[in-house]
Amino acid sequence: TRIDKAGHKHFMAKEITEQPAVIGDALGHYLSADGRDVILPGGDGLDFTQIDRMTMVACGTAYYACLTAKYWFEQLARLPVEVDIASEFRYREPPIPPRGVALFVSQSGETADTLAALRYCAGKAERIVSVVNVDESSIARESDLALPIHAGVEIGVASTKAFTCQLTVLLLLAIKAAKARGTLSEDAVADLLSKLRGLPATINIALEMDDDFKKAARRLAEADNALFLGRGLMYPLALEGALKLKEISYIHAEAYASGELKHGPIALIDKRMPVVVMAPRDALFDKTVSNMQEVMARDGKVILITDRRGAEAADGGIWRLLTLPEVDPVLSPILYAIPAQLLAYHTAVAKGTDVDQPRNLAKSVTVE
Ligand code: G6P
């Protein structure tokens, strides 16, 4: 089958807009007929009641999917999780406890470091699980259980739909683990799953805000540096937003956990520093507001990505306010990936860079 841009200027734009459809497709593959349970094809051997910990390993955007999933597995399933970058993990030769699952996330399934990390765990971990887009890849083949993300072919070097489909499958796995371990009731599971089924429609609403992101991006394109802040589930998203921006717009961007602002990055804040804050209104939102005030007191320019209640609670002085639909906080990383992607995309377009083929980067890194 020939893959074309379907009327879009770039594959990345096409892949961003495909997300409601591919996430819906992924859900369709993993939900039971009554929608109240998660089915893992071939997953009978994976018994979460016999597991004490999980080790997740990946590179790049897939690594940020793992960092997000750590919050889910720990909060929903009370399962301790460690996350590592494949190139660090493989050479550190960490001990692998016997009742542990080793989980590898890779779009291509061929990333050399991730594959080497998997081979290191083979025979040591209780089970080798992978979350992949390419079903017949090396990583999928060498796993005890390979969970496809059903994102379809991804051409843009900067990963978009693969990331949100990775998140979707990892969340389903965390919910499955929570149900098995008795940390979520059957009704709580059914409730989360029904909210997940509604997510593609919510993502469509975010995609319709394209013009708002474009306007904010026009200003972001003038910056030489940008800072991304988030806490909790939004911290990995901030990392992903900064990665997307530097990959395709070549603007230097870094991300910090909001609580770390005062431990270093605040020294960088001046009127030329845009600070992208990703923060739905949650239990910690008030702390985020005070972080933003610290930035604004130093003339930093805050781009706040939040929901309606967050927009109401944030005081004046925000440079650009982007208001997303409200979702259950558990699902927020999948929704907040959209503004992270669209901000980077429109910034790169405004700068005239090669969005689908950024300099020096490869879609799949099969050599060290
Ligand atoms: C490269 C790509 C990234 C990707 C990373 C991991 O750096 O440019 O978009 O996240 O590799 O690739 P994988 O195929 O293992 O997910």
Image (cartoon, rainbow, N blue to C red):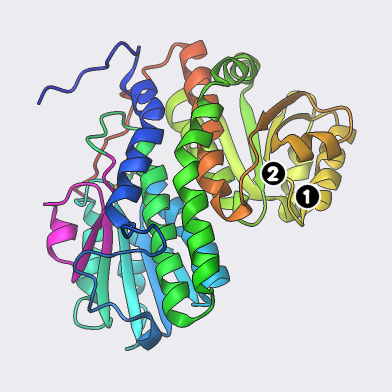
Q: Which residue is mark 1?
A: 285
> Do labels 1 and 2 touch, CB within 8 Å?
yes
Seen as rendered, the residue at the extreme front is 34
Q: Is residue 312 visible?
A: yes
Q: Is residue 270 above or below residue 284?
A: above
Q: Residues within 10 Å of mark 1 (few under 14, many from 20)?
A: some
Q: Position of residue 247 (x, y in %)?
A: 43, 32
Q: Give the spatial CA distance, label 1 vs label 2.
A: 7 Å
Could you tell whether 127 is left or right of 349 in the image?
left
Identify the image quadrant of residue 113.
Answer: bottom left
| Disc number for residue 306 | none
Could you tell whether 284 is left or right of 125 in the image?
right
Q: Residues within 10 Å of mark 2 (few under 14, many from 20)?
A: many
In which quadrant is the N terminus drawn?
top left
State the residue at coordinates (47%, 60%).
69
| Disc number for residue 279 | 2
Q: What's the magenta region? A: 130-151
Amino acid beneath label 2: Ala
Ligand 1 is found in the corner quadrant, namely: top left
Q: Between disc 1 and disc 2, whose residue precedes? A: 2
Q: Is residue 181 above or below residue 146?
A: below
State the residue at coordinates (48%, 34%).
201
Q: Secondary structure at mark 2?
A: loop
Q: Is residue 245 above or below residue 140?
A: above
State the residue at coordinates (31%, 22%).
11
State the residue at coordinates (69%, 44%).
280
Q: Is residue 159 visible?
A: no
